[in-house]
Amino acid sequence: MTKPMTEPLTERQLGMATEKALTPPPPGNPVMRLRDVGVAFAGRTAVRGVTLDVPEHQVTALIGPSGSGKTTLLRTLNRLHDLTRTAQVSGQVMLGDIDVYGGSISPTLLRSQVGMVFQRPNPFPTMSIYDNVVSGLRFNGARRKALLDEAAESALTAAVLWDSVKHRLKAHASMLSGGEQQRLCIARSLAVEPRVLLMDEPTSSLDPQATKRIEELVTELKTRVSIIIVTHNMQQAVRVSDYCAFLLMGDDRAGQLIEAAPTTKLFEDPSDERTLDYINGRFG
Amino acid sequence: MAQRAVLERDPLKEDQGPDGITGKRLHLPVMPDGLYRTILAAAAALFCLLIVALVVTLVVQARPAFVHFGLGFLTGTNWDPVHVKYGALPFVIGTLETTAIAMVLAIPVGLGTALVLVHAVHPKLRAPLSTAIELLAAVPSVVYGLWALLVVAPWVRSIIEPDLARTTGGTGPFSGPQLGIGLLLAGLVLFVMVLPTMVAISRDVIASVPKEEVEGAYALGATRWQVLWRVVLPSARVGLLGAVTLSTGRALGETIAVTMVIGNSTAIAHSLFSPAATLSSVIANQFTEATEPFHLSSLIALGVVLLAVAVLVNATARLLVRSVGRRSASSVALA
C-alpha cells in the first residue's frame, strides 16, 4: 500500500489482488494496529483505551461478556460507526501503514479492504445469489462480466458454497438455508479481496451443524485473509482462533481490553485474574 | 414479615393462601373463543355489507343511464343535459390526465423527500419535518382550492404557462390560450395534496428496510448513493408501489379543490392549459341542479365509472406488485 488509495479499485488492481493473496507475507506481522482506541456514543464512553496488534493471516478472537464492547470495537475497524451520528471514535487505527481515521483513505475504499460478516446472515433479499456475491465488486466499479464470473466462482469456492449453488446462481438468495446464507455473505465479502475480514458473532443465529461448517471455513480462510472474530462462545474462540483478546466492562461501564495473547496462552495461563475468572465461568 | 410469608409458600402449590390455608385462585374473566369469533365476524361482515350496499345502490340508480346509452355512455364525448345527451369520455380523460400530472410530479418529489427524511436529515430534524409534511394532509381540500384559485392560478397564468409554451414552441399539449385555471393547475393542486400521503408511506417503507441490509452494503464499500439505489429502494419497492397506489387513489377521487380550479368544461381538453372536468368535479358541480331523472341517473353512473377506474388502477398496481415480486431474482447469471 505505497500509493494513497483514494480512488475505487480498477478491475486490473482487483485482478492483481487475487494473485497477491496466493503468497501471504510471513505470519506474526500485525495487519492492524490499534492505539488507545475509544468509542463514545453521545458523550457516553462505550469502549476506551484499547491498544492491540492484530496479527496478519491469523484468526484473532475478541471475547468477553455482554456489554464489554466487542462489537463496538470491531465496528471501529471498518468505520461503520460513521453511520451513527452520535458516535465518536478516538485514538488511532492503522491498517498496514494507512491511518484508517487519518483522511488518506475514504471509508468506502477502507471497507473494501476490511470486509465484514454480521451476526445474522444479511444477503440482499432482492438480489440473486450471483448478484449478491459480486455486489461488492459492482459497488467498487467492476463491470466486466468475465472478471465478475471469475471472482464469483473463486469466492463461492472459498466459502465452500460453489458446488451447492453453481446450478442455481440466478436463484434468490433467500432460498438458501441460514448457514448457506451466512456462507454467501462470507463469499460476498471475500469477492472484494479484503485484507481483513471482521466477523461479528457469525454463528450466533445458526444451528450446531451450520456453526461447525462456518468454524471450519474460518480456519481455512486465514491463508487468504486476516480474520477478527467476535464471539461470546469461549469454546469457539479456542477452536478457531490463534490469537485472543479479552474485553471487560470496567467500573465506568466502558469496555476495556484486559489482555491479549496467543489463544493457548490466554486460556491455559492468563496473566490477569479477571481473565481467569471469565474463562472459568465465574462471571459473564 | 410479609416477605417471609411469601418465601415460605410452597411454589408448587399455587392455590395455597398466605396462611397456608388453601384458597381460591384468582380467575380473570375469559372471553369464550366462540363469542370472540362472532364479534370479529360481525364487524367484518358489517364492513363488507356496507361496500356491497354502496355498490348495489350506485348501480341500481345508474341503471337507467347505462340501459339507455349502453356503451355509448363511456365512449360518448358529448355531455349536454339540455338535449339529454350524456357521454362520460371527456371526464374519464380529465380524471386520468389530472391524476397523471399529479403523480408524475409526486413520485420523484415524494420519494426524494422520504429518502432525505430517513437517510440524510439529522435525527433531531426528522420528527418536525415529518410533522410539517403530514400537516399538509390535514389542510381541508376546500382551502387548497381557494389557495390554488387565488394565489397559484395567477402565477401559473403569468409565469409557468408562458414559460412552458415558450420552451416547447407552444404546440400540442402546450398550445392554446393561457388561462391559469385548467388541467395543469388541477394537476399541480393534486400533486400538493397527494404529496403527504406519498411521503408518509414511502418514509415508513424506507425506514423499515432492515438495518442489516443497509449496513451490509456499506460494509462492502458501497457509497451512500449506491446503498440507496441498489439496496434500499429495491428492497422497499413493493411498499413503494403501495404508496404510489394509495396516492393515485387519492388523486383520482379528489373533488372540491379540483372542481374549483379545473375550469369545468365538458369538452375534451386538447391542451394542458385548457379548462376541463373530472368525473368527480362534474358530479359535484351538477348534482344540485340535476332535476331531470336522466341527468341524475347519468351523474350516478359517473360515480360508478369513477369507482371502476379506481378499482382498475388498484388491480393493475396489485398485478404489478406481484410481477415485481416474481421478477426480483432475475439477473445475469454465470455460464
Image (cartoon, grey):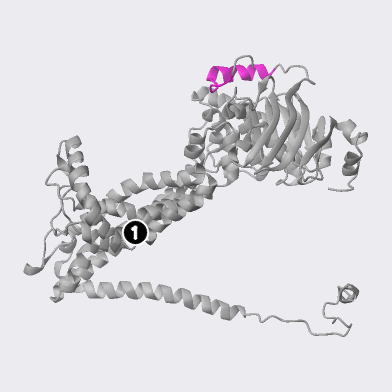
Disc 1 element: helix
Q: Examine the rendered structure and indicate whether residue B115 appears above or below residue A34.
A: below
In the image, which residues are magenta? A5-22
x 26%, y 72%: residue: B59
Residue wearing tag 1? B250
Q: Nearer the viewer, residue B9 or A237?
A: B9
Residue A9 shown in magenta: yes
Quadrant position of the N terminus of chain B in the picture: bottom right
x 40%, y 55%: residue: B197
- Residue B111: x %, y % from top left: 41, 46
> Position of B72 compared to B250: left or right?
left
The reply to whether residue B315 is visible in this rendering is no
- Residue A34: x %, y % from top left: 74, 28
- Residue B251: x %, y % from top left: 31, 57
The reply to whether residue B150 is visible in this rendering is yes
Q: Examine the rendered structure and indicate whether residue B260 appears above or below residue B58.
A: above
Quarter-of-image position of residue A35: top right
Q: Main secondary structure of the magenta part?
A: helix
Q: Examine the rendered structure and indicate whether residue A76 appears above or below residue A18.
A: below
Q: Nearer the viewer, residue A24 or A254?
A: A254
Chain under disc 1: B
> Position of A20 compared to A54: left or right?
left
Quarter-of-image position of residue B45: bottom left
x 74%, y 16%: residue: A25
Q: Amino acid at mark 1?
A: Arg
- Extreme residue in the left direction: B83
